[in-house]
Amino acid sequence: MFGSAASSLSLGGLELAVLSEEEVLPPEGDAYREFWNQGAAPTGPDTIRISLSISDAPAASGRVIFESQAHWSIRAEGSSRTFVDRDPSGPLLAVRFEPGSAEVGVECAPVWRVDGEPRRIRCPVRYPVDQILAMYLLGARGILLHAAGMIVNGRAVVLAGASGAGKTTFARLAAGRPGWEPLSDDRIIVRLPDGTREAHAYGTPWPGEGRIAVNRSAPLAQLVFLSRGERNDARRLPARDAAARLLTTASIPWYDADKLVGSVEACERLLDRVPAALLAFRPDVGAVEAVEDLLK
């Protein structure tokens, strides 16, 4: 029997409510601070209940469908998925979930406990667990993008690109410019609510080199793909070109054939609702002005 939710993590409109018989400490890292709600008990359609317990042997069942280089893997068993973190002694963490469900089960090995009284547990709902949950649980309702995000006079601009494309550079160029406010310099969640043509961009607790991570959101007005250039040049992209670039910057479980359909559908819905452009830019204020021209 789990106690009442004593804390939650806000991710792109989802509220990951952590339920445990023991106190759960906030996730490590300054970027999580404004996304973590200590003592909150969220309710509503976007609440994900995460039941956390200590186990001497976290269950790591199912076949491995993805193996990282950082000692963790994802396993499949029927329609359920399990994130497993381990060391040479065995599993340290097992996070079991059903994509599309509002219930997640987490088993932590005793090493997650903090010495002393009262008994407390280090929070396992942090990178990479929270990113994987967001990717799977959003499904067709949203997408996690490798992108910077800014709010410009109340509307969001998402600037997507692979590592080195200039996300942090652009965020720094826009910092302090009238009407521009930061969301993130590395990861953005876009929500695509049913029953409306509008999309919303959310900051996340996963910053880049600029350490920008703001818990805010705004209606998404423009999707921009970044590339380095010798001059600042922004041009509209036809749907086919935009789709090819989006699929390389979106977090999609390509290794999981049964579950990637929702993420691909979210990409299609995003491009149907939000105009896309390509910005070749050099690191000067003209890049920011080029995006402002797109918004006009």
Image: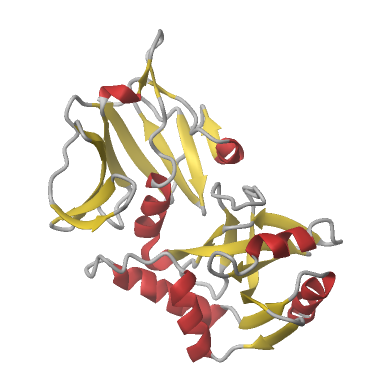
- Residue 257: x percent and y percent? 23, 70
User: Residue 190 vs residue 155: left or right?
Assistant: left
Q: Nearer the viewer, residue 151 or 101?
A: 151
Question: Which residue does the image show at 26% across and 27% down from the upper left?
Answer: 109
The vertical placement of 224 against 69, above or below, is: below
The vertical placement of 107 against 181, above or below, is: above
The vertical placement of 107 against 196, above or below, is: above
User: Residue 291 vs residue 11: left or right?
Assistant: right
**Which quadrant is the N terminus positioned in?**
top left
- Residue 58: x percent and y percent? 19, 33
Question: Which residue does the image show at 51% across and 31% down from the upper left?
Answer: 40
Q: Nearer the viewer, residue 190 or 251?
A: 251
**Which quadrant is the C terminus positioned in?**
bottom right
Q: How many marks?
A: 0
- Residue 39: x percent and y percent? 51, 27
Applied colour scheme = secondary structure
Question: Which residue does the image show at 40% across and 8% down from the upper left?
Answer: 116
Q: Nearer the viewer, residue 56 or 90?
A: 90
The vertical placement of 292 against 130, above or below, is: below
- Residue 192: x percent and y percent? 49, 68
**For the view shown, which residue lies furthest in the right direction?**
178
Question: Which residue does the image show at 46% across and 65% down from the upper left?
Answer: 143
